[in-house]
Amino acid sequence: MASPNLFLCILLVVFGSHLSTISAAGDGEQSFVVVSTRSFEAQDVCSTSTSTVTPRPNRAGAAVPLVHRHGPCAKSPSTDKPSSFAEALHRSRVRADYIMSRALRGRGTTTIMEMQEQKEGKVSIPAHLDTSVDSQEYVVTLGLGTPAVEQVLLMDTGSDLSWVQCAPCNSTDCYPQKDPLFDPRKSSTYAPIPCGSDICKRLQSDRFDNGCSMNGNGTQSQCGYRVEYGGGLKTRGVYSNEALTMAPGVVIKDFHFGCAYKQIGSDDKSDGLLGLGGAPESLPVQTSAVYGGSFSYCLPPVSSGTGFLALGAPSNTSGFSFTPMTPFMDYATFYLVKLTGISVGGKQLCIPPKVFEGGLIVDCGNIISHLPSTPYAKLQSAFRAAMAAYPLIPSDEYDTCYNFTGYSNVTVPKVALTFTGGVTIDLDVPNGVLLDGCLAFTESGPDDYVGFLGNVQMRTLEMLYDVKGGRLGFQAGAC
């Protein structure tokens, strides 16, 4: 007698075409895309075809351009670009493992990286707060203060508290940045948050508190903040109120952020960080009274293109497909969705549903998507079979990278992900599937282990976070 899993796989194949889709994965040649190998090469010039991209015209909220911090569209391109796929994979794994170490350490669960360190005789002591910043790749330019001063900020859905480096701060206390430091003394709307305020007390309960600074007469007056990241960066200073300009005429009053006077560890070029997580300190939660707690972004297909970050939801969301979204465990910061299936080249992979129970953390600060062992093995096997015409690069660091030397075009299979509710999205080909000629997925851990939806897979999709509605929306071809 055939097993229940076999019947399930047959049903998935037969009825998969009736699922709600953004761009349904079909059969035959339509499930493969012929692409130029030039699409794998980094461009040195900002693309004029994508640099003027704006959100859908029915959006009522505020929107700003979004660019890759290593690309030519960045105001001050970062110089710490991963030198290889192996380095990008390492950064991605460090970030993912750090997030999981925070969540699982209290449950006595050991992460993949910790197990490896134990074998090598190493001891891992993670930082106390927030995520690794090394893997974050996208920046937005906002105006801070009155008059508004441009600030280039890393965009991170895995962080809540936003901050910028503030003057006066010498080279030993702050890392070098190309833009001038934000000087609160030159802003008419700047004000430190009082130490005894409810806003400051909430920092303590959320573990961002650094105590209260002393003013000239010896009384406690200013609210201190402190954030430690998994990558080694530490920032602390004064939690403050300021005007934040999203676009001409669109000003957020009384935006709470960290005015940083002490940094440990190095960053590169960016002036600070913009937190888009789900905790009270984040920009979406702070502006929920105006924009409903919703926000969206679209990551461009290549680093030489431009996408957008927008607050608020479009007035018409009929073009989106939605899947349920919940906080990850007790951490309001992280957004979790449930994957239910994967297809490669139009063929649904036979994967037991129970292995997806851990869900995926939607993390724009993570480069590569992480899947539990069984889904990853199935995806890797099917992708390799579909790409059998091209030579694999032998390596101990990564397992599915191709040598396209001598090929002007290559044929790449479509990869589609299905989420709870039957929502299926086709990833962009090749840039939502391959990174530097390598399959942009890796293993997160055992089956039913939590995975991550990385930023490579989000490319060209408008990702709409409807936090109050508890759902995540996808719309194809948005940038």
Image: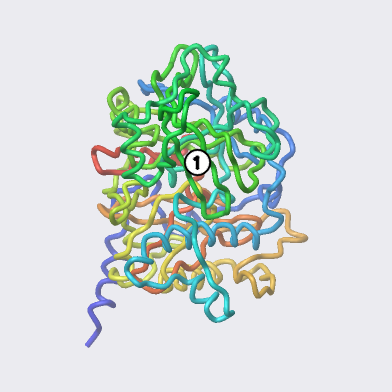
In the rendered image, residue 314, in percent from the top left (x then y), is placed at 34, 27
Q: In terms of depth relative to the viewer, which is nearer, 134 or 434?
A: 134
In the rendered image, residue 326, in percent from the top left (x then y), is placed at 27, 49
Which residue is located at x 39 percent, y 36 percent? 282
Q: Does any portion of residue 310 appear in the rendered image?
A: no
Q: In terms of depth relative to the viewer, which is nearer, 181 or 395?
A: 181
Seen in the image, is 469 located left or right of residue 114? left
In the rendered image, residue 207, in percent from the top left (x then y), is placed at 38, 47
Mark 1 residue type: Thr
Kindly state the secondary structure of the residue where label 1 is placed.
loop
Residue where numbered disc 1 is placed: 460
How many marks can you see?
A: 1
Q: Is residue 201 above or below residue 345?
A: above
Q: Is residue 372 above or below residue 118?
A: above
In the rendered image, residue 388, in percent from the top left (x then y), is placed at 60, 71
Which residue is located at x 42 percent, y 35 percent? 212
Residue reaching furthest front?
217
Which residue is located at x 41 percent, y 54 percent? 25
